Amino acid sequence: MSDQNCILTINAGSSSIRISLCTTTGDLQQILSGKIERIGLKEARFRVNQKNTKAEIPIEAASFHSATLSLITWLEKQEWFPKVKCIGHRIVQGMKHTKAELITDDLLKELNNIRDYDPEHLPAEIAIIELLRQKHPLLIQIACFDTAFHATMPPVAKTFAIPKKYDEQGIQRYGFHGISYSYLMEELKKKNQTALKEKIILAHLGSGASVAAVKNGKCIDTSMGFTPAGGLVMSTRSGDLDPGVAWYFMQKGMSSKAFNNLMNHQSGLLGISGLSADIQVLLQHEKENKDAALAIDVFCYQVKKYIGAYTAALGGLDTLVFSGGIGENASVIRTRICEDFEYMGILLNEEMNLNNEGLISQKGSHVNVCVIPTNEELMIAKFVSEALKNIK
């Protein structure tokens, strides 16, 4: 590793930071991964996985700022850090940007101007970029936008039914999880050369969850909207909500900050169940806890509805892909989502599904149902590698 240049990827959230290190010689190889989680809590931790060896690193993470400083200090102590050629960042909201770009003063100014569009992610992403620029001003940094994958959506899919002046101000459906979806499409193409000509639904189901419809290799619709809080029920996010609910809470004196916290951190599976945001915990308790059972049912029902809607929008369905922490690992959730989809030609092989195999549909199924583990960090590294070719 010491003789190879590397790409470092950083995926910052409001309470976590993921990192990954890839070598740039030949095909990109992921050689290290790590995650700081539970930032701001006493039980914050930093775990690193390198060469199949896992380690937990002591870290100061009382705030996002202190966690970022601790991470940079740790990075600077690594023997491979001088070999880092570039840092690639996942940027959740990219507005009109359609590909990875060099982070410049102008781009940072633009991101700062829209930081209120996604207060759960953008401020953290901007903060870590600015700290790295202060400490290592000569290090190239590249922005990889989660929204870029969805830039091909037609106006009928991305337009909200509000006065046009707000659309002109950028209030529209953007969609997220785009880096994950880009990776899934690449993996599909490896397995199936005709994937770009097919009607595909991608379901990224994790603590954040969304569904995307892809036709002829291009996204035509997706469940998340102006922010990542829209669409499906998620671990702690409400998903789609009647705007009248916001009005009701405002009449009761709830502040915008409190409402944002309610919708993003107290709702979803956690809100319905009153027990946990973790679907595995809910599955363990669903038989004796009716609220846990209801939370699971609502989650599966919402995913099922979107799959049905997007099959109609696509004019049929060739391939259904499950990914994300829930989509990759919870076979019972996949079963419940696909129940009663025989009329659409979806037939699961329950043994293959139980084993989380790559293809879980029966031989006679008209729709291929796949499980593909996503890898956003590797996809960021690929985007960065391409972007570097255009930087002189």
Image (tube, rainbow, N blue to C red):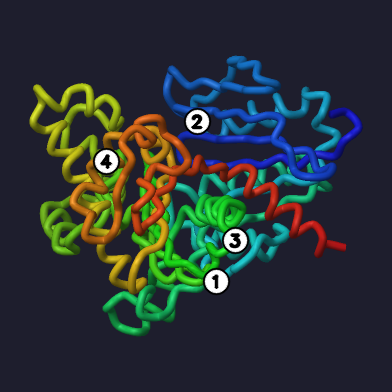
- Asked if residue 385 can be seen in this view, the reply is yes
Q: Amino acid at mark 3?
A: Gln
Q: Amino acid at mark 2?
A: Ser
**In-front residue for pair 10/110:** 10
Neighbour tally class for label 3: few under 14, some 14-19, many 20 plus, Cα within 10 Å: few
Using residue 292 as the reference point, say whether residue 218 is left or right of it: right
Between discs 1 and 4, the one toward the N terminus: 1
Between discs 2 and 1, the one toward the N terminus: 2
Q: Residue at x 28, y 78 (%)?
A: 162
Using residue 319 as the reference point, say whether residue 163 is left or right of it: left
Between discs 3 and 2, the one toward the N terminus: 2
27 is higher (above) or lower (below) than 241: above
Which of the numbered marks, if any, corresponds to residue 96?
1
**In-front residue for pair 5/43:** 5
Q: Nearer the viewer, mark 4 or mark 3?
A: 3
Q: Secondary structure at mark 2?
A: loop
Residue pointed to by mark 2: 63
Neighbour tally class for label 2: few under 14, some 14-19, many 20 plus, Cα within 10 Å: some
Residue pointed to by mark 3: 193
Q: Amino acid at mark 4?
A: Thr
Between discs 4 and 3, the one toward the N terminus: 3
Q: Position of residue 16 (x, y in %)?
A: 50, 34
Image quarter (top left, top right, bottom left or bottom right) of the N terminus = top right
Q: Residue furthest bottom?
A: 164
What is the C-alpha distance between the residues marked 1 and 3? 30 Å
Q: Position of residue 184 (x, y in %)?
A: 53, 51
**In-front residue for pair 369/269:** 369
Which of the numbered marks, if any, corresponds to residue 335?
4
